[in-house]
Every structure is written in C-alpha cells, then in structure tokens.
Image (tube, rainbow, N blue to C red):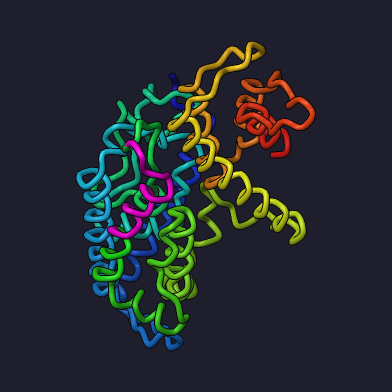
Amino acid sequence: MKLTQHPEYQRVYIANEEAFHRCQNAMAQWQERNDAISVPAYGLTWTYESAREFVRELSALFQEYNHILWNGFHYCRQCGGQCCVADASNVQPFDLIAITLLDQSAPVLAENISASQRQCIYLVNRRCSWPAEWRTIKCWSFYCLGPGPWRPGASISELRGEITRELQQLVRTRLPLPLQHYENIQGFALADALDDPIVFSEAIHNALFEIFVDPLNEVYPIIDLQLGNNSSNTPPEPRGTLTTSLLLDDQVATFIAEAVEEACETPPVVPAELTISVEQLLQDLEALQWIIEGHPSHESQLLHELYLHYANAPAPAPGDPPSIWYRMCDYLSKL
C-alpha cells in the first residue's frame, strides 16, 4: 500500500520523524557544548559520553533479553511477529534520544510499503525497520505465549512464569547502574514488573524520564515536540473511569487465562449459532489479550470486530453455567 495511506502515517511516522530531527539537533548541541547535567535527586551527573555509554548498556541488555525470547523459548519464532500491529510501537522520547546517541536514524520508509493497515507501519517485509541496535522499549519488552499449541499439561501461568523468571534474572544482573540508583531510591525493583511486559516497559520509561529525559529536557527542550504515539496533550481519564477500566481488564485477563486452558485441554463444542472454530477462538483470545494490555487507539473497532464473532452465542439454560462462547460475548460487550 501507499505509505501515505497507512493510518499511522501522520500521527506516528511523520510525528516521530520530526521529533527525531529535533533530538538530533539537541544532541548535537550537547556534544558541542560538552556540559554536565546534574540530577541530584538520584546522585547522577550526565555528560554526552556517559549518556552514550548508558544507552549502549541498555541496548546490550535488551538484545540479550530478546535472545532469551527468541532462542530460549519457541513462542516468538512460532508466532513470527503477530504482535507487530498498528499503534503497538509506542515510540517515546527516550527511544528517539537513544537512536541519536547510537548514531542511528529513525526509519525512512519507501513510497510503497509492505505493511497492511492493521500492521505496524515500521514492519517491512515482516521485519522491523528500526535499527537492530535499538527497537522501541515497548517492542523490545513485549512477550506472550503466541497462538499455541502449548506444552500439554502445563497451565498458562506456569508457561508465562518460565519466561518471566529468566527475564527477571537477566534484568536484575544486567541493569545499568543509573537505573539501580533509581530502584534504590524508589524502593522497588523494575524486574518485579515483568509479570506484565507492558507494565514493565512503562516502568522503565518512567524511570528513564525521572533520571535522564526530564533533566535533559530542562537544558535541551525536546519533550513537547515528541507527540508520536502517546501525546502528552491528551487529557487523562477521570479517576473513576480509569479504575473501572482497570478492574474490568483484570477480570478479562483472568477469563482469557482460564479460557485458553479450557480450550486446549477440553476443546468445547461450537454452538450451531456460531460460524467459528476453536482455533479461531484461541486466536481471538490472544488478540483480546494484546488489546487489553496495549489499548491501541483503534481499540473500539478491534473489539467490535471480535464481538461479531460471538454475537449469536446462545445464552445458558436456567441453572446451567455459561459456555466459553457466551462468556466471550459477554466480556466483549462490556468492553
């Protein structure tokens, strides 16, 4: 398709391209002036060269992190990048600063691209077009169990736990010293958030903002111009709405884990009212997991499309428990 026709063209690709050039200019000024940026709250002082070394250490950490995901487990190899969907990249200011400090560039895409409307605009011939030295932190952090099949007899929580423990061990042993300072002062370990890779990536970005991005921005303003995937101009949700949403997400996440286990161990009979298969159910559960973790901007459209698969699911007879099909329909209608 034409690059300009992709839904992420203006709000992601162009916005991040412009923000990257601003970062380039800011980093060039910092390198030329060679001044020190002090962060007394965390006992840190940044120079241009120390920042470059910090980014190199983070790059090495996340490359080893992804080596574990791709070589230690089969899920990523088996899935082949189905998580590379529109609005998933979540490019943040530190991502653009990092590629600048690594002497890399933001992707420059051709006039005609291979990504579909539902795929990430940066996906080129099924490969990420971001530099190998730095993918976005959210993309680098993300892991899941893919569409299956999974090891017989193992629960979803057990399989995810195997991944989480290996990643936690790596992060705890290879975390750069400035982030260890952050952990000590804040009183928690970033690796503890790895049960949920989206939460982990947000925790990393929050830490990076505190110890590096915000102090840097005070000297070389760049943040207000980084409107890419996550505009700071978007007003926050009311607290009550947000709390209700999070509670529902937790309920749906529990249902997904139970439903996947049930569908794999004892495949349910498909009601005559539905034109769907158990395999499609598993794919939809995986898609639903990604939606509630990432909350993409076109979330409502994706949820509606999933809901149509189950809209005709029959209600349970009096006294009978609801089927997996009806429960899927019920949760999708609430979302």
Picture residue at 63% right of the left edge, 48% below the top: 251
* Image quadrant where one finds the N terminus: top left
Picture residue at 70% right of the left edge, 56% below the top: 242
In the picture shown, does residue 29 fall above or below 198?
below
Any magenta on residue 55? Answer: no
Q: Judge whether residue 31 can be spotted in this image.
A: no
Q: Which residues are magenta?
A: 152-166
Any magenta on residue 164? Answer: yes
* Image quadrant where one finds the C terminus: top right
Picture residue at 42% right of the left edge, 37% below the top: 83
Q: Is residue 29 left or right of residue 117?
A: left
Q: Is residue 303 left or right of residue 314?
A: left
Q: Judge whether residue 164 can be spotted in this image.
A: yes
Residue furthest to the front: 319
Q: Position of residue 298 (x, y in %)?
A: 61, 35
In the picture shown, does residue 224 fall above or below 255?
below
Q: Position of residue 178 (x, y in %)?
A: 33, 77
State the image quarter where residue 47 is shown. bottom left
Q: Position of residue 56 (x, y in %)?
A: 23, 63
115 or 81: which is nearer to us?
Answer: 81
Question: Magenta: predominant secondary structure element?
Answer: helix
Q: Is residue 139 left or right of residue 65?
A: right
